[in-house]
Amino acid sequence: MEVTKKQYQTVTVQCRSLFKNKMSDYGAAWRILRLPSLTDQIFIKAQRIRSLQINKEQMVAEGQESEFIGIVNYSIMALIQIDKGIAEQPDLNVDDALLLYDAQFQIIFDLMMKKNHDYGEAWRDMRVSSLTDLILQKLLRVKQIEENSGKTLVSEGIDANYHDMVNYAVFALIHLQQPVT
């Protein structure tokens, strides 16, 4: 589990760095996005990853890694939106946004550690393509919950699905960044 913690934290730093740089470039313009808009952004990224995995040919230079980082960051934005509500105008500076980002990532990390313990790090034996498919499945679930006005009868809510998407994307990034043996 110590190796997982270290690898997870390395990916977290990478994702956070891009989030911080984009906040510096664009501000908190994302704060006006409604949850379905964020879900659709994540869906586009997951579909592109799947397309890259299936077609093996790409026309845009960015590969799977940048798309998985996007899934992480958009999912965390969605979780912040759930907690804070949607803003009419950007209302966060970089430092405040990073505090919220870090708080969400800590919740997700803690969840990963609990699940990783119970599942025995099963994700290590999974293919990146399977992690992609699981993210797409979670997105379809989120879309259905959104269509149901956020209500579920027996299932986890939207936030739990975003948590899982972040963890699957981090696991995929760990796999992609490991040297091939």
Image: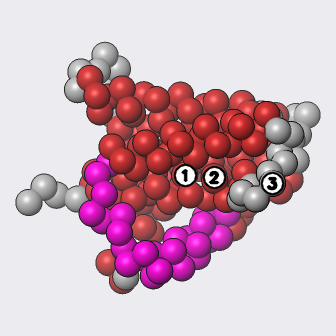
Q: Distance between the residues labelled 3 and 2?
A: 18 Å
- Mark 1 against mark 3, which lies toward the viewer? 3
- Which numbered marker is on residue 162? 2
Residue type at the position of mark 1: Met
Q: Which of marks 1 and 3 is nearer the N terminus?
A: 3
Residue type at the position of mark 2: Tyr
Compared with 178, 19 (above or below) is above
Q: Nearer the viewer, residue 137 or 85?
A: 137
Query: Which quarter shows the N terminus?
Result: bottom left
Magenta stretch secondary structure, dominant = helix
SS class, disc 2: helix
Image x and y of residue 161, in percent: 63, 53
The answer to the question of whether label 1 and label 3 lie on touching residues, with beta carbons closer than 8 A, is no
Q: Is residue 13 visible?
A: yes
Residue at the limit of the structure toward the right, as seen here:
88
Image x and y of residue 156, in percent: 71, 59
The answer to the question of whether label 3 and label 2 lie on touching residues, with beta carbons closer than 8 A, is no
The residue at which mark 3 appears reads as: 153
Tell me: 3 left or right of 156.
left
Residue at the limit of the structure toward the front, as seen here:
153
Q: Nearer the viewer, residue 144 or 32?
A: 144
The residue at which mark 1 appears reads as: 165
Residue under the image location 46 percent in, 55 percent down: 168
SS class, disc 3: loop
- Write down the quadrant of residue 132 in the picture: top left
Magenta residues (range): 104-128
The answer to the question of whether label 2 and label 1 lie on touching residues, with beta carbons closer than 8 A, is yes
Image x and y of residue 181, in percent: 8, 60
Q: Does the magenta stretch include residue 111?
A: yes
Residue type at the position of mark 3: Leu
